[in-house]
Image (cartoon, rainbow, N blue to C red):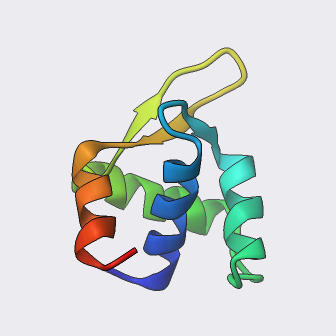
Amino acid sequence: MNLLAIALLQSCRSAAPYGVPVATLVTHVRAAGHREATVPEVETQLRALGDSGCVSRLAGLLGPSWRLTALGADALKEAGL
């Protein structure tokens, strides 16, 4: 798992059980040291994490948001985070 994926999972964990909009996740990962992260890059990584079952996409009135799943929480635990 790459560092951007870990930062995204941690950001989603901080908002559990609610979802986090992409714009907020971009802000979080930039603050975590991924200063050059772009919205398309974060969206691509979120789709990959969704495909692996680590996050789930939620539809909302203000656009989609992402939530950590039990599998994502386990992945963070296994990484010692």
State how many labels appear.
Answer: 0
Towards the viewer: 81 or 5: 81
Residue at the far top in the pictured view = 61
Percent from the top left, x then y, of residue 51?
25, 51
Q: Which residue is drawn at 30% across and 55% down?
A: 72
Towards the viewer: 15 or 27: 15
Residue 1 appears left or right of 63: left
Q: In which quarter of the image is residue 27?
A: bottom right
Towards the viewer: 64 or 77: 77
Percent from the top left, x then y, of residue 66?
50, 40
Q: In which quarter of the image is residue 40?
A: bottom right
Residue 54 appears left or right of 35: left
Residue 56 appears left or right of 74: right
Percent from the top left, x then y, of residue 49?
34, 58
Q: Which residue is drawn at 77% across and 73% down?
A: 31
**On screen, residue 20 above or below 29:** above
Q: Residue at x 54, y 30 (%)?
A: 18
Residue 74 appears left or right of 65: left
The quadrant of the image that shows the N terminus is bottom left
The quadrant of the image that shows the C terminus is bottom left
Percent from the top left, x then y, of residue 45?
45, 64
Q: Residue at x 70, y 69 (%)?
A: 38
**On screen, residue 66 above or below 18:** below
